[in-house]
Amino acid sequence: MKQIDLRSDTVTLPTAEMREAMYKAEVGDDVYGEDPTVLNLEKLAAEITGKQASLFVPSGTMGNQLAAMSHTVHGEEIICEQESHVYYYEVGGLAVLSGLQTRTIVGDRGRLSPAIIEAGIRGKDIHQPQSSLIWLENTHNRAGGTFYRPDQLSAIRNTADDYSLKIHMDGARVFNAAVAQRISVKELVQHVDSVMFCLSKGLCAPVGSILAGSKEFIEKARRNRKMLGGGMRQAGILAAAGLVSLNKMVDRLAEDHDNAKRLAEGIADLGLEIDMETVQTNIVIFKVDKSKKSADKITSDLREAGILASQFGSEKIRMVTHYGITFNDINATLAALKKVIA
């Protein structure tokens, strides 16, 4: 029985072209700045994002934590959406590594507006931490893959400038956000000071993420990366796959979005509760309480049918489309789900 893995786009496997590029990669010592393949990847990533420089890091979480460390000083506060990845899934790293406090705000389907950000900015009070960084997630994982538009980001930039705050974008899936809007990543991230994006999710590289920003910011991040043990040596073997990701795997993300929309429509037809407004990219989150079965029971039954999904609490399930998931896989998933909830 074929297994259909919809738990996450992190389960994607490197393409044959990536494997060949990794095998043939020209390498050197990246800590010494001598790995030509890493340098090529960082140059391309900086060009794509429109930033002065970029840094290859082992994971998206490390990229995010480096951004926090490099933008702030201990005792300050960042403003983020209440279910953002950095707050929910990064093991308290903001507090442990950067000595930061988080001010969490309820967003609209994961998105923050200038008004609610402004309401969360601390005043000049010696009893309170100083606000220093606005944190945006684009696309937003727990909100179902929702994205920011450039005009929304421009408005947030204006607010940030009014209060002399920096903006970091957790853009783990920012290429999904750009493809969905048919714009370039450069246009989408032009209003933020730094951006992290993953090569190892929808773009299919086996390992790695990119952190991009100003030259001064990346110099700080490179030093902090070394401190956290992220200074890799002959990392060009990994960076080679990332080059294929950026050159060959971006446009095909639209196929994942089409599959996600079809999956979501099928789930709605089964009578399960789903907010179709959130199905903007490749993530589908739905509630199963109407089925009178728990999310745990349904995911367990789906697993027996060869379908892997993620449980989001007692009532929600998440499914993520990605490279390797086909039109027929969506049909098979819907058929299995129909049997499970019957």
Image (cartoon, rainbow, N blue to C red):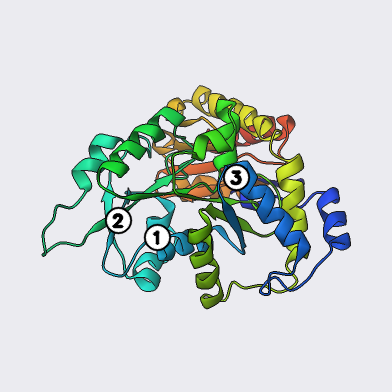
Give percent across and percent down for residue 159: 29, 39
Give me the residue at 74% from left, 70% from top. 34
Element type where label 1 sits in the image: helix
Compute the Cα span from label 3 to label 2.
Answer: 45 Å
Q: Which residue is mark 3?
A: 302
On residue 132, which mark appears?
2
For the question of whether residue 296 can be seen, the reply is yes
Number of labels in the image equals 3
Mark 3 or mark 2, earlier in chain = 2
Q: Which residue is mark 1?
A: 71
Give percent across and percent down for residue 199: 65, 51
Q: Given the image, on which type of amino acid does mark 3 rest? A: Leu
For the question of whether residue 149 can be seen, the reply is no
Q: Looking at the image, which is closer to me, 257 or 18? A: 18
Give me the residue at 41% from left, 28% from top. 151
Q: Nearer the viewer, mark 1 or mark 3?
A: 1
Residue 263, placed above or below residue 220 = above
Q: Given the image, on which type of amino acid does mark 2 rest? A: Ser
Q: Looking at the image, which is closer to me, 213 or 172? A: 213
Give me the residue at 37% from left, 69% from top. 98
Compute the Cα span from label 1 to label 3.
Answer: 44 Å
Tag 1 and tag 2, C-beta contact below 8 Å: yes
Give percent across and percent down for residue 247: 75, 42
Quarter of the rendering containing residue 174: top right
Quarter of the rendering containing residue 162: top left
Compute the Cα span from label 1 to label 2.
Answer: 8 Å
Q: Looking at the image, which is closer to me, 119 or 281? A: 119
Element type where label 2 sits in the image: strand
* 267 lies left or right of 124: right
Element type where label 3 sits in the image: helix
Q: Given the image, on which type of amino acid does mark 1 rest? A: His
